[in-house]
Amino acid sequence: MKNNGIKKIIISLLILNFIILIIIGILIYNYIKLCSTEPVVSDFIFSSKEEYNTEDLEIISNKNQQEEKKIKSNPNDWNLLLINKSNKIPVNYSVELSTVENNQKVDSRIVESLNIMLQDARNQGLNPIICSSYRTNNWQSQLYNNKVRKYLSLGYNSEKAKEFASYWVAIPGSSEHETGLALDIVSKSYQILDEKQENTKEQKWLLENSYKYGFILRYPKDKQDITMTNYEPWHYRYVGLENSAYIKENNLCLEEFIEYLKEN
Ligand SMILES: [Zn+2]
């Protein structure tokens, strides 16, 4: 009788062991199957949104867009008009102007982007002021001649005075201000156009964020030998959203970007 009892216990233990082994086997099989199946992007997109942070979705979609992204801009696009010492404003250039805050005038096509940028800056508690925008050729001539006179009064000859003046005030016909696509923005708390402008919280914000609205800093510090213009941490130029993002991301100035477009 005693032997029979022991036999039953051993058989029961063997059956139990067998069942446990089968369960472990099923678990291992499922685990391996799970690891070998890679989720695809559509699994994320079409899964319940609550399971995934919307930021994750944005990152996935931005990544896909960037991979496909190729600049399709044409250097002849209106917003890429290159004006500098070697590229004067076309003779028949005409611009439709709109008046914006502070009684300034800009090309009507950039008004919306400009207003949103300034509003967003103000929403951050900042006080940007447009101190200069569209200028007629006459007005540009007056500014330029004033600067030349200043250098003449310092004792420079006519040739040198004109050269030095041109680093600060564009020669009439070669100023972006005559297109209505550029404007000077300063901090309300510091309205002097010198390098210290870059230290104001308004410029810090604009330098970092203006590209999100289609604007670029036109005369960066590290591009003075290409732009042939002194560093101006207040002069912003509208080039359009796609272009501004590319220029910012690749640390280009407008001259370099247009060269890049022509080569590709
Ligand atoms: Zn300017």
Image (tube, rainbow, N blue to C red):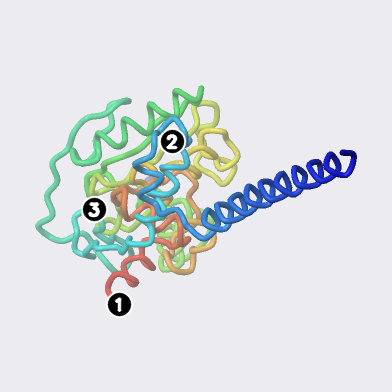
Number of the label disc, if any, that sits on residue 79: 3
Q: Is residue 243 above or below residue 181?
A: below
Assign a secondary structure to mark 3: helix
Q: In which quarter of the image is the C terminus?
A: bottom left
Q: Residue furthest right?
A: 2
Query: Which amino acid does the dot numbered 1 rest on?
Result: Glu
Assign a secondary structure to mark 2: helix
Query: Which amino acid does the dot numbered 2 rest on?
Result: Thr
Image point (21%, 64%), residue name:
74
Q: Is residue 158 above or below residue 116?
A: below
Q: Of callouts 3 and 1, which one flags the residue occurring earlier in the amino acid sequence?
A: 3
Q: Mark 3 against mark 2, which lies toward the viewer?
A: 2
Q: Kindly report the distance in space between the C-alpha atoms of the residues bearing marks 1 and 2.
A: 38 Å
**Mark 2 highlights which residue?**
54
Residue 263, given in percent of the width and then of the height, sits at 30, 77
Q: How packed is label 1: few (under 14 Cα within 10 Å), some, or many (20 or more)? A: few
Front one among 182 and 259: 259
Image point (31%, 30%), residue name:
115
Q: Of callouts 1 and 2, which one flags the residue occurring earlier in the amino acid sequence?
A: 2
Residue 130, given in percent of the width and then of the height, sits at 38, 33
Q: Mark 1 against mark 2, which lies toward the viewer?
A: 2
Residue 59, given in percent of the width and then of the height, sits at 45, 46
Q: Kindly report the distance in space between the C-alpha atoms of the residues bearing marks 3 and 1.
A: 19 Å
**Mark 1 highlights which residue?**
263
Q: Mark 3 against mark 1, which lies toward the viewer?
A: 1
Q: In which quarter of the image is the N terminus?
A: top right
Residue 197, given in percent of the width and then of the height, sits at 55, 40
